[in-house]
Amino acid sequence: MVFNHLSGDIIMQAIIPMAGSGTRLRPLTYSKPKALLRVGSKPIISHIVDMLISLGCSDLILIVSREGENIPRFVHDRYRNIRIRTIIQEDRLGLGHAVNMAADAVRDEELIVMYGDTIIDGDLSNVRSIGGDGVIAVKKVQDPRRFGVVEVKDGVITKFEEKPAVPRSNLAIVGFNYFKKPRILFESLNQIITKNIRTKDEFQITDAFDLMLEKGLVFKPLEVEGWYDCGTPETLLETNRFMLDKDGFTRELSDSIIIPPVFIPDNAEIIHSIIGPYVSIGDNAVIQYSLISDSIIGSDARVVRASLVGSLIGDHAEIIERPRRLSLGDNSSLDFELSET
C-alpha cells in the first residue's frame, strides 16, 4: 500500500516501526493499534509525525502489522503533503527485522529511524551538525537493564547492548536514530538476520549498531530532556499528563467545573461534571454528572454518573454508574445498577 501525496522535494527519510501487538495495553489494543491511542490532544503517531516533519522529513516508511493497517490511512488523511509508504510485517521477529524490511525502499541518504511507541521531548534540530556517521538519542535511566544501552567514551559511542543483565552505563536508547548514509545499517541488519544472530530470541537493531561500530562507523550520543513511553496503562497516563502540561490545554463550560490542564474538543458534550486535572477527551464523547481526573476518554464514549481516576476508556465505550479506576476497550458497555435495600 503506497500513499504518495508529496509536494516539493523530499528532504529526509524516516522509518517508523510500529508492528508490536501492544499486549500490555489490552483491552484497548484489541480493536485499535497502540499508535492510534490518544495522549494529550492527538494520537501517539501524530506526535511522532509532527516532530519528524519539523526536522525536515517528508518521506515516511511505516512498518505495521496486519492489525495496524489503518495507521497509514490515518496518517495519509491527516498529512497530505508528505510521501507515505507502508510495509506489513507479517512475522514479529524483532525491531531489527522490522527496520530491515524497509531496505529496498530507502535511498542511501539521510535517514531517521524513530520508534512508534515513544514521544521524545528535546531539541533534535542540531542532529545533522553533531558529527560522526550517525546520532543515537539517549537518556539516563534508573534501571538500564530494561532497555538497549550505549557506552560512551570521549563523546563517542563505543558499545551497544540490548537489555544487558549487567549494564555498562545508564544511557538508554530512546528510539530516535539518525544516519548520514544508511547503506551500512542495512548491510549489518541483513548480516545478523542471515547468520541468525538473535538477542532475547529476536533480531535486535542494537546488534546491527554494534556491527557498524566494528566496521569503523562513528556514532555520537545526543542526550534528550524527556522520553515518554506509551507501552503500559501507567506510562500512557504519565505521557498524557506531560503532554497536557506542556501544551496547557483548558476549556470553560457554563455548567461544569474544569480543572486544567485538560483537552476537551468542541464537539464533546459535558454536562454537570467535574473534569480534570489531566483528562484528555476524544471527539463526540458525552460525559454527564461525572467526576473524571487523570484519565483518557475515547471518541464517541459515554460516561454517566461515574467517578473515574487513572482510567483508560476506549472509543464508543459506555459507562453508567459507580466505577473508580477502569480500563475499558472500544465498543464496550458497563452498567452498574444500584441494588435495592
Image (cartoon, grey):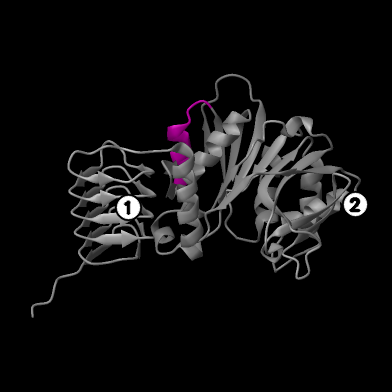
Residue 332: quadrant of the picture: bottom left
Residue 16 position, x and y percent, is: 60, 44
Mark 1 crowdedness (10 Å alpha carbons): few <14, some 14-19, many ≥20: many
- Please tell me which residue is depicted at 29% across the width and 58% down the height of the picture: 331
- Residue furthest out toward the left: 341
**Quarter of the view holding residue 289:** bottom left
Q: Is residue 16 left or right of residue 184?
A: left
Asked if residue 232 is positioned above or below residue 108 in the image, the reply reads below
Q: Does the magenta run of residues contain 6?
A: no
Q: Which residues are magenta?
A: 70-81
Magenta-span inclusion, residue 75:
yes
Dot 1 falls on a residue whose secondary structure is loop
Task: Residue 151: give x, y in percent of width and height.
Answer: 82, 55
User: What amino acid is found at the position of numbered circle 1 in the picture?
Assistant: Asp
Secondary structure found at label 2: helix
Q: Quadrant of residue 43?
A: top left
168 left or right, relative to 67 = right
What x and y, as percent, mark residue 133?
Answer: 83, 38
Q: Nearer the viewer, residue 36 or 203?
A: 36
- Give, as a three-letter code, the residue at label 2: Glu
User: Can residue 18 be seen by looking at this rendering?
Assistant: no
Where is 108 relative to 62, above or below?
above
Q: Nearer the viewer, residue 143 or 201?
A: 143
Q: Residue at x 55, y 57 (%)?
A: 20
Pick the front one: 341 or 6 = 341
Reading the image, the residue beneath label 1 is: 315
* Residue named by callout 2: 214
> Dominant secondary structure of the magenta stretch?
helix
Q: Work out which residue is located at the far bottom of the displayed protein and give it.
A: 341
Whichever of callouts 1 and 2 sits on the residue coming sooner in the sequence is: 2
Q: Locate the C terminus and report the quarter of the image it occupies.
A: bottom left
